[in-house]
Image (spheres, rainbow, N blue to C red):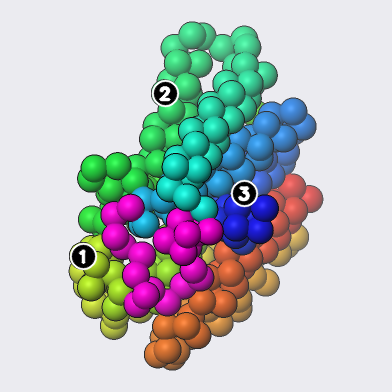
């Protein structure tokens, strides 16, 4: 089981769950929280994230993007710990698990909604599965063209937060785009660190990530923009809603993001950046928990 656990990359789960928790906290603050919806949203998200990680492991291996020059942890398919055929089967299984869990979630949340609403969310769910697979797998993986940042921003930000909030409340407010944007930008920050770390190997294999396209120095500036705009969006949300003192609790997480940005700016050895992937993911989770608890209490 060890190769499968490593291929599932459990350290990415806190980041995947951050947007779901944000949506749940916001719904709870408006007294429209459902445990069954929250649990099913978490299960569906975990299935989608594991699916994405398996597809990424498989896609990079069969497309020749995993080489000895890669700085990150060794991949299962490339190393031979898991065969390509076995990984394809796992991708199919987690695609079905994501679909079943997602349909169950929509049934519980939208049983009284119109069929148009149900169909729209079902389409969004199927699109999430396709996006998870085609990031690095398939004939033309969009992740190799530098579009991964946009996908991560949309699904880990707007779709995750706004989707879960709507499933709880059946309403939307444009100001919710601000905390959703914060979650999305911080998630892109994790991907950006990964791509800065792998900039040399990605250049050799033709993977056109954002850091490869703009260069390391500009990628560092881009990283600070992701962090800075993410923090500003959360502040704006509280200013618009005249937040109480307890609702500013999330500001305590900001030093974690500043520490991350300084590390990305100063560390030149790609291997030294690897721990800051986890640090950025956990910082995002801390931000969401502090934001959610503070907003709920306030």
Residue 63 image offset from top left, x and y in percent: 29, 54
223 relative to 11, above or below: below
Magenta span includes 64: yes
Real-space Cα distance between discs 3 and 2? 21 Å
Real-space Cα distance between discs 2 and 1? 32 Å
164 relative to 58, above or below: above
Q: Residue at x 47, y 50 (%)?
A: 83
Q: Quadrant of residue 134?
A: top left
Real-space Cα distance between discs 1 and 3? 31 Å
Report whether 65 appears left or right of 279: left
Q: Which residues are magenta?
A: 62-81
Q: Quadrant of residue 14?
A: bottom right
Q: Residues within 10 Å of mark 1 (few under 14, many from 20)?
A: few
Report whether 187 appears left or right of 144: right
* Labels 1 and 3: the sequence-earlier one: 3
* Labels 3 and 2: the sequence-earlier one: 3
Look at mark 1 in the image and give the residue it sits on: 206
Taking depth in this image into account, of 47 and 265 the one nearest to the observer is: 47
Look at mark 2 in the image and give the residue it sits on: 123
Magenta span includes 229: no
Mark 2 or 1: the one toward you: 1
């Amino acid at each position: 089981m060890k190769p499968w656990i490593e291929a599932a990359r459990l350290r990415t789960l806190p980041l995947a769950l951050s947007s779901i928790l944000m949506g749940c906290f916001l719904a709870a603050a408006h007294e429209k929280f459902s445990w069954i919806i929250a649990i099913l949203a978490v299960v569906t998200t975990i299935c989608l994230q594991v699916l994405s990680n398996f597809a990424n492991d498989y896609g990079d291996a069969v497309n020749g993007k995993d080489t000895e020059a890669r700085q990150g942890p060794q991949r299962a398919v490339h190393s031979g710990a898991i065969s390509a055929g076995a990984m394809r089967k796992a991708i199919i299984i987690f695609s079905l698990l994501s679909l079943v869990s997602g349909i169950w979630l929509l049934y519980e949340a939208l049983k009284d909604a119109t069929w148009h609403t149900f169909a729209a969310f079902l389409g969004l769910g199927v699109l999430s599965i396709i996006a998870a697979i085609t990031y690095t797998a398939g004939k033309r993986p969009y992740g190799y063209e530098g579009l991964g940042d946009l996908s991560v921003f949309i699904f880990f930000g707007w779709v995750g937060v706004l989707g879960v909030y709507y499933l709880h409340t059946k309403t939307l407010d444009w100001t919710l785009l601000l905390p959703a944007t914060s979650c999305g930008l911080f998630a892109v920050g994790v991907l950006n660190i990964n791509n800065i770390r792998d900039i040399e190997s990605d250049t050799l294999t033709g993977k056109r990530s954002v850091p490869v396209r703009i260069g390391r120095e500009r990628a560092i500036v881009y990283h600070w923009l992701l962090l800075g705009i993410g923090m500003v969006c959360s502040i704006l949300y509280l200013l618009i809603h005249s937040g109480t003192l307890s609702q500013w609790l999330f500001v305590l997480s900001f030093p974690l993001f500043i520490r991350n940005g300084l590390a990305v700016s100063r560390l030149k050895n790609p291997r030294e950046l690897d721990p800051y992937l986890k640090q950025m993911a956990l910082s995002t989770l801390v931000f969401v928990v502090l934001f959610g608890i503070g907003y709920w209490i306030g």
